[in-house]
C-alpha cells in the first residue's frame, strides 16, 4: 500500500508568503485575549460562526457557502462581512481525505488542515500543516469521543435533547509532533447554539495561531455535518 499522503497538495498551492511588516494575520491577532469563544446557531440553514475573545471583541466571522462545488468558507473581521480576512478552500469534492487550504486576503498561505480519513470515524482526528509542509505540524484529536456520541444520540430524544448541550462537553486538543499542547477547544453549555471555548496552551507564531483557530472552525463545520 502506498504511503503517499492522501490529501497532499501541489507544491505550488502551499508556497509560503514572504514576511510582510503589515501582516494581516498578525494585525488580526494583535491584543487577542484568551480564552476565545467560537459560537454558531444550531438551527441556521447555513453555518455562520463567530469568534470573540475574552474582552468581547469579535475576532472572526465566517459563513459557509453550501452551494459551491468546491467547498469555500470566507472569513471576515466581523459580522458585517465588509472586510475579508481569509479564505478556506478545498481542491477536491467533499470526501474523507479532503484538505482545506487557508489563505489571507492577499492570497498568502496561512496553512491547511485535513481530516485523517477513517481514523476520524470514531474519534475525530485532524492534521494541521504550516505553509510549505507535507509533514503535519499539529495533530488535533478528540480527547473524549464518548461525550460526542452520547450528545448525538440523546440529542434526538424530545425534551432530553434540549439538555444535552449542558451534559456533554467534547474536547479537542491540538498538539505538536513532540506531544506539546498548543490549543484546546471544549464544548460549552448552551441552548439552541453551538458554543466552544478555545484556550491557548503554548507559544506559536501568529500564522500558526491563526492556522489552528481556522482549523478548529473547519473541525466544527465538518463535525456538525457528520452529526
Image: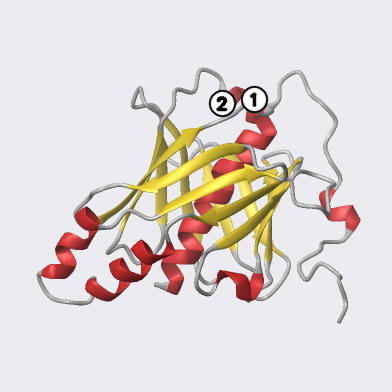
- Where is residue 119 drawn, in percent x and y? 61, 71
The residue that mark 1 highlights is 26
- Say which element carries label 2: helix
- Where is residue 59 drawn, in percent x and y? 46, 33
- Say which element carries label 1: helix
Q: Which quadrant: the N terminus?
A: bottom right
Q: Which quadrant: the C terminus?
A: bottom left
Check whether the beta carbons of the residues at disc 1 and disc 2 lie within 8 A of each other.
yes
The residue that mark 2 highlights is 29
Q: 155 and 24: which one is in front?
A: 155
Point 44% across, 39% down: residue? 198
Image position of 188 (left or right of 103) = left
What's the CA distance linking mark 1 and mark 2? Answer: 5 Å
- As drawn, the residue found furthest toward the left would be 159
Q: Badge 2 local density, few (<14 within 10 Å), some, or many (20+)?
A: some
- Where is residue 105 drawn, in percent x and y? 67, 40
Amino acid at each position: 500500500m502506498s504511503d503517499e499522503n492522501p490529501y497532499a497538495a501541489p507544491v505550488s498551492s502551499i508556497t509560503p508568503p514572504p514576511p510582510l511588516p503589515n501582516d494581516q494575520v498578525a494585525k488580526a491577532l494583535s491584543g487577542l485575549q484568551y480564552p476565545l469563544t467560537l459560537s454558531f446557531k444550531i438551527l441556521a440553514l447555513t453555518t455562520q460562526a463567530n469568534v470573540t475573545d475574552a474582552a468581547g471583541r469579535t475576532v472572526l466571522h465566517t459563513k459557509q457557502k453550501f452551494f459551491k462545488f468546491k467547498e469555500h468558507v470566507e472569513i471576515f473581521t466581523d459580522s458585517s462581512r465588509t472586510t475579508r480576512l481569509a479564505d478556506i478552500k478545498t481542491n477536491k469534492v467533499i470526501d474523507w481525505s479532503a484538505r482545506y487550504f487557508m489563505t489571507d486576503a492577499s492570497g498568502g498561505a496561512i496553512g491547511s488542515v485535513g481530516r485523517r480519513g477513517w481514523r476520524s470515524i470514531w474519534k475525530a482526528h485532524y492534521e494541521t500543516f504550516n505553509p510549505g509542509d507535507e509533514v503535519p505540524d499539529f495533530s488535533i484529536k478528540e480527547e473524549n469521543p464518548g461525550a460526542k456520541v452520547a450528545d448525538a444520540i440523546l440529542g434526538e430524544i424530545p425534551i432530553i435533547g434540549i439538555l444535552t448541550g449542558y451534559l456533554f462537553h467534547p474536547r479537542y486538543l491540538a498538539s505538536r509532533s513532540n506531544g506539546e499542547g498548543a490549543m484546546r477547544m471544549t464544548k460549552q453549555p448552551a441552548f439552541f447554539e453551538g458554543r466552544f471555548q478555545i484556550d491557548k496552551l503554548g507559544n506559536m507564531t501568529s500564522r500558526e495561531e491563526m492556522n489552528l483557530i481556522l482549523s478548529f472552525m473547519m473541525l466544527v463545520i465538518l463535525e456538525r455535518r457528520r452529526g
